[in-house]
Image: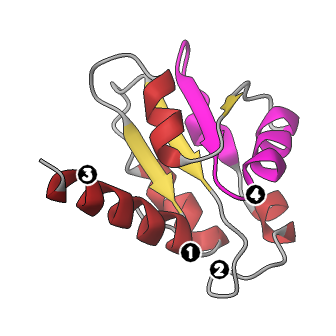
Amino acid sequence: MLAKNPAGWQEAMTMIDPRVDQVVIAVNGQVPDGQDLSWLWDVDFAALDAQGRRVVACGERGADLAVRLEYAGIHCQLAPLPMDALALCRPGKVEMLLNYTAMRDFKTVLGEKGARR
């Protein structure tokens, strides 16, 4: 799922399948995203807090996101890129929540992987 602002993040988190126990969440801080990520503190990440759910933060500003999640009481793993985050997940369904350039870059990587087959 794509989320671009605090309201979008709130809404997207309500669409995460509650039966899914793995979530990859990515934030970049490029110009199209907005380089000031202080808005992360305006997002209530409680919807990610499901018993036993694995949360992996990633992206160029993944460390900032991981700090915010930890302050929200959500323990997470940290990976550099969404593909790296997926590699940390068990086989099965994974929900992904990414901001604009993280989604754009992830789609590019997926396209390249598909072209190599």
Whichever of labels 4 and 3 marks the residue nearer the N terminus, that label is 4
| Residue sitting nearer the eye, 90 or 49 | 90
Residue under circle 4?
61
Q: Amino acid at mark 2?
A: Asp
Disc 2 vs disc 1: which is toward the camera?
2
**Residue 79 relative to residue 92: left or right:** right
**Residue 107 relative to residue 104: left or right:** left
Mark 2 nearby-residue class (10 Å; few <14, some 14–19, many ≥20): some
Residue under circle 2?
33
Q: Amino acid at mark 4?
A: Arg
Q: Residue at x 64, y 54 (%)?
A: 59
Where disc 3 sits, the SS reads helix
The segment highlighted magenta reads 45-71
Disc 3 vs disc 1: which is toward the camera?
3
Disc 1 vs disc 4: which is toward the camera?
4
**Residue 82 relative to residue 41: left or right:** left
